[in-house]
Amino acid sequence: MTETSAKRGSGRAGKAAGGNPISRLFGAVTLFVRQILDELRKVVRPTGPELVRYTTVVVVFVLVMMAIVSGLDLGWSKLAAWALSGN
């Protein structure tokens, strides 16, 4: 019976990585940090005017949502007060 290529490769990969658990740990941490740095190099940072524009959009959106929620809260509280007052 022959082994599949996945089974054959899995046994060799463990031996090639080294048997020492400490060295494997440091190797894994090093790989992780290297991958983080590679991803950070891909990040596109906004320019000054873009940052101001994005911040303005977020602040305006939050203010609009606050106004909507406040209006609904006021309306529901008036409705509840009217319904429970008995007048």
Image (cartoon, grey):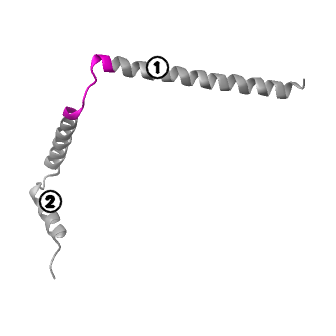
**From the image, which quarter does the C terminus lie in?**
top right
Q: How many numbered marks, from 0 up?
A: 2
| Picture residue at 37% right of the left edge, 19% below the top | 53
Residue situated in front as seen by the camera: 81 or 28: 81
Q: Is residue 48 left or right of residue 30?
A: right
Q: Is residue 36 left or right of residue 19?
A: right
| Picture residue at 14% right of the left edge, 69% below the top | 8
Where in the figure is residue 45, as x and y percent of width and height? 26, 26
In this picture, is 4 found above or below 64? below
Q: Which of disc 1 and disc 2 is earlier in sequence?
A: 2
* Nearest-to-viewer mark from 2 and 1: 1
Secondary structure of residue under mark 1: helix
Residue situated in front as seen by the camera: 58 or 25: 58
In this picture, is 59 found above or below 14? above
Query: Which amino acid, by three-letter code, is at mark 2?
Result: Gly
Query: Residue 83: which quarter of the image?
Result: top right
- The residue that label 2 is drawn on is 14
Instruction: Residue lying at the far right in this picture: please name it.
Output: 87
Secondary structure of residue under mark 2: helix
Q: Is residue 53 left or right of residue 46?
A: right
Q: Count residues near mark 2 (Cα–Cα under 10 Å), then give few for <14, some for 14-19, many for 20+.
A: few
**From the image, which quarter does the N terminus lie in?**
bottom left
Is residue 48 within the magenta segment? yes
Where in the figure is residue 13, as x and y percent of width and height? 13, 60
Q: Which residues are magenta?
A: 40-50
Where in the figure is residue 34, as x and y percent of width and height? 16, 39
- The residue that label 1 is drawn on is 59
Q: Count residues near mark 1 (Cα–Cα under 10 Å), then give few for <14, some for 14-19, many for 20+.
A: few
Query: Which amino acid, by three-letter code, is at mark 1?
Result: Val
